[in-house]
Image: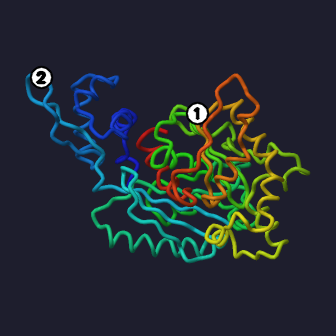
């Protein structure tokens, strides 16, 4: 979709009022917006014409004609996302309501960019054949790592080292004619948690992403927190070099399990086979408990979220063990503690978050 077809700032205000509302009338939008009734009606008509919204029959309230309901149009547009882990490339296709149309993997090594691009182009061709009625509003890419300069260049883990020098937006936009947004995987997952996960009622939340490394994403008043250098949530940087191996990174757990004879073929294998009774699991939980408690105390003190979600590639049973290890209620702070909750999305949700990036930023102004 070309830039001139994307919503204007005024249109994004309309979409933000409608998004997440099961039923909202044109009259309700007028009352909540900063524009006149005439201007609101013109904006809504334009969004309906371009496929973002649709009108429905409204309920009768008192005398006169019922004000039509306004809803997100789930049938005409879509957004696509890719996410990268140490051993997988995941793809999601979502409609504008955040409902999943396609959740799959590209059968290519995640550390070979040109093979990923080739496979992605083939999958896009298939999607266009399978969903001819859908126009793509944009593409999101969720990458592990942190930024050292340009906003779409990441210092990735060694397992994704081939991506370190690549400007992600231009790499994909050169072959894919629409807006491309690149973001850290944990921030992408935090957006997914709020829009389609368990974070609907948490306007201020944190998301802990347990992957080969360890990171976080934050939302404040429904807006993603990026930081001045784009590295908000790089909580691994809290730890000194001698502490780094004792943080709750799944690469470290995999190493500990290997030392005890449990060989795993990557983190996908860990997620599929995980057994809390494996030798080494309880010892690792005890080892990382101080860093978990430090993480929660730091997030509480700086961001003060109402909820912290535990997700990433950690299987559900491990997420719950990590929540127990992170509990700081015994410290009896006078200020309210955040709720510690498992992610409401099964598995790593970064690819869902990647597909939500264009919706969150281009449509909702997030």
Residue 215 is labelled as: none
Q: Is residue 25 visible?
A: yes
| Residue in the picture at 73% in, 26% down | 333
Q: 36 or 311: which is nearer to us?
A: 311
Q: Position of residue 13 (x, y in %)?
A: 37, 33
Q: In the image shown, does 212 or 315 lie closer to the viewer?
A: 315
Q: Secondary structure at mark 1?
A: loop
On the picture, is 54 further left or further right than 234? Answer: left
Q: Nearer the viewer, residue 42 or 305?
A: 305
Residue 214 coordinates in the image, percent (x, y): 72, 53
Q: Which residue is mark 1?
A: 306
Residue at the image position 41 percent from the left and 65 percent from the top: 102
Residue 62's tag is 2
Q: Quadrant of residue 224?
A: top right
Q: Of all residues shown, which one is farthest toward the left?
A: 64
Assess disc 1: are there few (<14), some (14-19) or many (≥20) residues with their C-alpha within 10 Å of its C-alpha. Answer: some
Residue 161 in the image: x percent, y percent? Answer: 73, 66
Give me the residue at 33% from left, 55% from top. Answer: 77
Q: Which sits earlier in the primary sequence, circle 2 or circle 1? A: 2
Q: Residue furthest right?
A: 242
Q: Are marks 2 and 1 in contact (CB under 8 Å)?
A: no
In the image, what residue occupies the spot 77% across and 48% down? Answer: 236
């Amino acid at each position: 979709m070309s830039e001139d077809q994307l919503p204007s700032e005024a249109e994004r205000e309309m979409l933000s009022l409608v998004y997440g509302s099961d039923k909202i009338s044109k009259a309700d939008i007028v009352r909540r917006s900063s524009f006149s009734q005439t201007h609101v009606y013109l904006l809504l008509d334009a969004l309906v014409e371009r496929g973002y919204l649709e009108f429905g029959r409204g309920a009768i309230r008192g005398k006169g004609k019922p004000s039509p309901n306004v809803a997100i149009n789930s049938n005409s547009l879509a957004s696509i996302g890719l996410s990268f882990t140490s051993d997988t490339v995941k793809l999601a296709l979502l409609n504008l309501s955040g409902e999943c149309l396609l959740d799959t993997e590209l059968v290519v090594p995640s550390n070979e960019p040109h093979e990923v691009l080739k496979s992605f182009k083939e999958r896009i061709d298939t999607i266009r054949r399978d969903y001819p009625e859908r126009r793509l509003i944009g593409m999101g890419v969720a990458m592990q790592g942190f930024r050292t300069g340009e906003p779409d260049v990441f210092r990735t883990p060694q397992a994704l080292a081939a991506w370190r020098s690549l400007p992600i937006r231009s790499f994909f936009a050169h072959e894919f004619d629409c807006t491309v947004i690149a973001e850290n995987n944990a921030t992408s997952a935090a957006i997914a948690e709020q829009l389609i996960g368990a974070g609907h009622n948490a306007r201020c939340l944190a998301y802990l992403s347990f992957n080969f490394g360890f990171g976080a994403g934050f939302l404040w008043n429904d807006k993603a927190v990026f930081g001045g250098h784009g590295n908000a949530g790089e909580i691994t940087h809290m730890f000194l070099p001698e502490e780094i191996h004792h943080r709750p990174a799944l690469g470290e757990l995999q190493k500990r399990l290997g030392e005890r004879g449990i060989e795993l073929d990557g983190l996908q294998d860990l997620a599929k086979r995980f057994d809390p009774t494996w030798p080494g699991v309880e010892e690792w939980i005890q080892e990382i408990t101080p860093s978990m408690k430090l993480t929660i105390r730091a997030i509480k003190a700086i961001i003060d979220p109402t909820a912290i979600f535990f997700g990433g590639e950690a299987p559900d049973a491990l997420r719950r063990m990590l929540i127990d290890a992170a509990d700081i209620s015994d410290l009896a702070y006078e200020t309210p503690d955040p709720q510690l909750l498992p992610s409401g999305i099964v598995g790593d949700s970064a690819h869902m978050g990647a597909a939500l990036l264009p919706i969150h930023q281009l449509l909702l102004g997030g």
